[in-house]
Amino acid sequence: MLRPTVVLALPPSEAEAVGAELREAGYATAVVQRPAELAALLDVGTDVAVAVLDGETDFDALLDYHVLLHEDGRAIPALIIVPAPMLERLLELTAGTSSADEYMSRPYTAESIRWRIEAMCIRSQTPTGVAEGPIIEQGPVDPTVWRQRGRVVAVFNAKGGVGKTTIATNLAAALATRRSKKVLLVDADTVTGHVATSLGLDQVVTLADVWREGPPADPVRSLVEIAAPHESGSSVVSLTASPLGVEVLEPGRVAAAIDGARAHAEIVVVDLHPSYSPLNRAIFGVADRILVPVTPDVPALRAAVQLRDVADQLKVGGRLALVVNRANSGVSVADIERTVGLPAVACIRSGGLLFVRAANEGRTVVERYPREGVTEDFEALADRILGLPRSEPAKRSVFGLLGRPRSLAGRGATGEPARV
Ligand SMILES: Nc1ncnc2c1ncn2[C@@H]1O[C@H](COP(=O)(O)OP(=O)(O)O)[C@@H](O)[C@H]1O
Ligand SMILES: [Mg+2]
């Protein structure tokens, strides 16, 4: 299928990387160095879906590009790379022209641009009228809203049983109930997922149920609309209840839906299946942060080491952070960080039967046992996700779970997890 053209008005090295990524996804790309080149392209009637503009290097050229995208009855959305302090000025200068523009700041990855563009294309195909209303917000972008645009936090380790679902559900609950955040919890474990069941939401409509009836006109809307409220304060949505339902869940579309959901939640927490499936890789592409739960045992650590080893290939390097789970006395965070070669952001102590009891009631430990130490651990993790400082360092110690420790560039060996 031939896809429309994406215009890249970026510095050459960035245009090259982003262009390669987009062409792999089937888009045509056109690199322009000056507004006159964009004008020429539009004059010959090129079908331009989105223009990626650099608002950081040359602000005046950015404004010229933007005018061209809206001249002669055109309304071509732009994905604008702009540092947050310049956004307000940009919004003033472009007020009234386009509400479909999106903004990002450096550093970015080519893959993140690709998924943003997928999401923008899907949204711009939405018939007018359907897009209006509470789900897809219209009208000028409020810069404060942009700054609060939700973050996507995925929870992943290719080993099962390390606490991905436990951490996803309790982190979501801590963010919602203890930090009053608007949270969307996505169960993207398409095989063994049990976020909904562990929260007592058994009969929920899943995304696969909806998409099985035909390709969604608006994937973001279909995802957000079926999310069910839970007592823990989060809205919860499952991709599928059956491992056989996945064929309708086209990875790019799911990732674009999750990416778009950040307009409706401050934090989107995504619980993943333990595998390197195309779906997971597409979701990695839109995640701002990938939390990697590890338990202090060799199989879990090995799986984390394996992830670190393929991180560059997966283009997730820099977004991975360990969460040391069942981190009771005798476990050194610094040793685990060195062994795996990734920074840790938090430790979750063992909660024993509290998890079983809470799950039997369809609740999270955070809600059910608010005074327990393990709930404090989830609050501390929530604060790291929100970028808040950590109150007290973790001090625990044991050595050599996987033989010789590796050094972790640029980090001290204090045993204190790094900031997200
Ligand atoms: N910190 C913890 N303390 C006690 N039990 C835990 C803890 N973390 C996870 N568990 C239990 O371990 C099991 C596996 O956890 P789960 O979150 O389902 O792992 P995953 O999603 O990685 O497969 C569950 O029964 C869960 O209740
Ligand atoms: Mg799980």
Image (tube, rainbow, N blue to C red):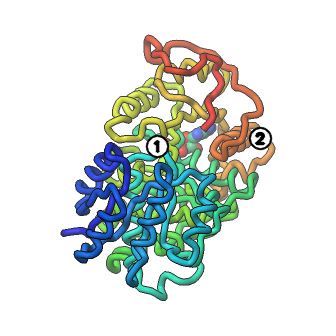
Vertical placement of residue 139 versus 145, above or below? below
Q: Is residue 402 above or below residue 194?
A: above
Residue under the point 69% across and 25% down:
394
Q: Residue 263: x percent and y percent?
A: 56, 65
> Ligand 1 near label 2 (Cβ, under 8 Å)?
no
Q: Which residue in the structure is indicated by mark 2? A: 372
Circle 1 crowding by C-alpha within 10 Å: few under 14, some 14–19, many from 20: many
Say if residue 193 shows up in the picture.
no
Q: Quadrant of the N terminus?
A: bottom left
Residue occupying the point 31% across, 68% down: 248
Left/right placement of residue 218 relative to residue 1 reads right
Q: Quadrant of the C terminus?
A: top right
Q: Which residue is mark 1?
A: 156
Can you give x and y, in whole percent of width and height, for residue 246 in the image? 33, 62
> Which residue does the image show at 59% across and 79% down from the upper left?
134
x, y percentage for residue 86? 60, 55
